[in-house]
Amino acid sequence: MQTRKWLLLLALASVVGLYFWLDLGQYLNLQTLKAQQQAIEAFRTDNPGLSIAVYFSAYVVMAALSLPGAALLTLAGGAVFGLLWGVVIVSFASSIGATLAFLISRFLLRDWVQQRFGQRLQAIDEGVKREGAFYLFTLRLVPVFPFFLVNLLSGLTGMKARTFYWVSQLGMLAGTVVYVNAGTQLAKIDSLSGILSPGILGSFVLLGIFPLLARKIVDIGRTNKVFSAWKRPRRFDRNLIVIGAGSAGLVTSYIAAAVKAKVTLVEKHRMGGDCLNTGCVPSKALIRSAKLLSHMARAKEFGIASARAEFDFATVMERVQSVIRTVEPHDSVARYTELGVEVLEGTAKIVSPWEVEITGHDGATQRLSTRSIVIATGARPFVPPIPGIQAVGYLTSDTLWNLRELPRRLVVLGGGPIGSEMTQAFARLGSQVTQVEMGPRLMIREDPEVSELVARRFAAEGISVLLNHRAKQFLIEDGERILVVEHAGGDLRIPFDAVLVAVGRAANLTGYGLEELGIPTGRTVETNEFLQTRYPNIYAAGDVAGPFQFTHTAAHQAWYAAVNALFAPFKKFKADYSVIPWSTFVEPEVARVGLNEQEAREKGIPCEVSVYHLDDLDRAIADGEAHGFIKVLTVPGKDRILGVTIVGEHAGDLIAEYVLAMKQGIGLNKILGTIHIYPTLAEANKYVAGVWKKAHAPQQLLAWVERFHAWRRG
């Protein structure tokens, strides 16, 4: 492939070089064309077929190689072949030549651009896939835009060649007619600039703007059609109503209050949502207690002969609730009321695109009108319909925190982040844990070596991990609960005392009026890039909108939802998911941002991999945590970061440096040049940059430097 590229590049360079070396451009000027018009017409009269073939071929070559002179050739087409045949010949020749330029650009440059700007090009390709033909057509209508640039840049995108061809032929037709017609009046033309008078240019600009205006009109019409079945209030009680007081809802309402909008936040259950009450906060509190016990079990590693802890599981769970109560004021009704948010406790239902009916806990109802609505209703644990599961009873991440007696035998269904975190925590607290995962490995979204490290730690801690096992049926036999799982070797029976279902989460979509309003939903509420639903003034953010179900991404989306809801149509922002980090708080801790190796392979994105192993880090050795690694993916030959995976102590904290670097365009060279405190775990970020630098050391230059130093020694 590379050889063919170089050969094509050499051939193109030779042709272009020959064009300029022979100064063929001297023949492509208005004066020469006028002087030779009669001779050319005579040749065409004597050789009609040959003259068309020669002219057509010359035009295709000129357009394909982006050589100057296309305007003059178009005039010649009108002068020699007349308006009708001139338009036909030029239209096809220019479109074929433009498509060849498009294909040459794609063949020679797209792979290089993909390597260098892969992620950004992906976003452009998605836009081109949706609306590329429309915008290409608009550009083709306005001759002010250099067509050769349009050809070359379009080739770098994912637009299909046939789409590029027919849109180009249709879009360039108006300009072709103007130039060919001018060519039929060649004697009256004094200069090329005279063809496109200010009036004609203005007409082309209006022609180019027309599709945009038409699209805007269509959008307005579509919006009006959506709203046509509803009566719009003459005035609004609120600027914004937010449904749900989890992370997305809290941040949305906070931003609205901060910019002095009148905002109402409605929560039917508990302020703070899943994260505060049943997710992030309680799980990390439980993990912390379990980790303390694990350190005591490792006492000899730290030079302590023995260490033993007496604890009561109920007390540990009460501590979890105490942590929740301590954090609770941050998300409380009192705090948000003080911030300027009206907080109503009750159930909200959207009854029209501008009205929300709120039923309080006392049964009283009120209906509020609002310019915009944000749906932030979150998600709940998904419980698969496994036969017998209702009969045996089950725990989820919502109900787990009601436990006050430690299950002696615990089955955990699911090998994702929640299942893995709770598996390790309960094993460290003393449960005999069996983790069942139907996939080939734990934490399937991570690289295989990450899964392997976690699985090895689980095995060392006495956890039974069953991979490629699918839960088939729950039974109760002689008063004992049994899970039947199937795998390649047949069925396996696992007796247990409690089962935790952690196989994913489902968005909360019902009961909020979405069905009645016809707002499309799948696994989540369907939104566009601005987080708008079918109704442009109704938005969704957080777990209910996807695509990520993290507290920090919900807060991230909330900014876009709030600003767009309050300031559209004057200003809107597309939600940016280019740099999304996450962490799984098992031990060893796992954190990631951007691409990992398996994703890069699946998407065909070239990358270089630099790895630094933490068993070489002084602080990790001193802390007794010398395990894990940092893996950085970069653009081949460049220090620009495509993604980072960290496995090890405090990985979730260490990843922040890379999140900042990727967001702000900072490469590994600058991380290497930044002072990191010794001895800290954060030094590892600098050392992995050093690994990259060593791999890219200028060997030839170093050889000359070595000779220089030898010369200086005499």
Image (cartoon, rainbow, N blue to C red):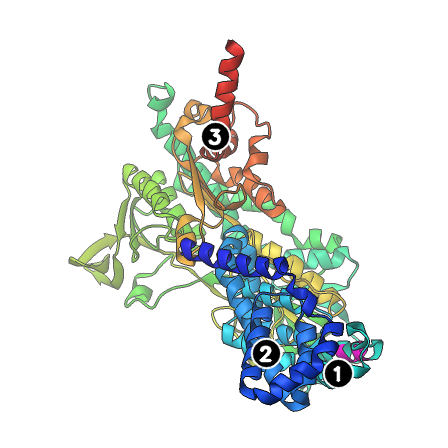
Magenta-drawn segment: 200-204
Location of residue 544 with respect to 325 vertically, above or below: below
User: Cα distance, mark 1 to mark 3?
Assistant: 60 Å
Where's residue 470, x and y in %?
26, 60
Picture quadrant of residue 249: bottom right
Query: Quadrant location of residue 661?
Result: top right
Residue 547: say if magenta: no
Instruction: Categorize mark 1 by other alpha carbons within 10 Å: few (<14), some (14-19), many (20+).
Output: many
In whole angstroms, how far apart are the C-alphas of marks 1 and 2?
A: 18 Å
Q: Is residue 169 visible?
A: yes
Measured in 3D between alpha carbons, the distance from the residue under mark 3 to the one under mark 2, in whole angstroms, is: 52 Å
Instruction: Name the residue type under label 2.
Output: Tyr
Of residues 456 and 250, which is closer to you in this image?
456
Please state which of residues 228 and 154 is positioned toward the viewer in this rendering. Answer: 154
Residue 224 seen in render: no
Percent position (x, y) of residue 223? 68, 81
Identify the element where label 3 is drawn: helix
- Comes first in the chain, label 1 or label 2: 2
Is 86 situated above or below 151? below
Residue located beneath label 1 in the image? 182
Q: Residues within 10 Å of mark 3 (few under 14, many from 20)?
A: few
- Residue furthest to the left in view is 489
Q: Which residue in the protein does label 3 denote?
A: 700
Mark drawn on residue 55: 2
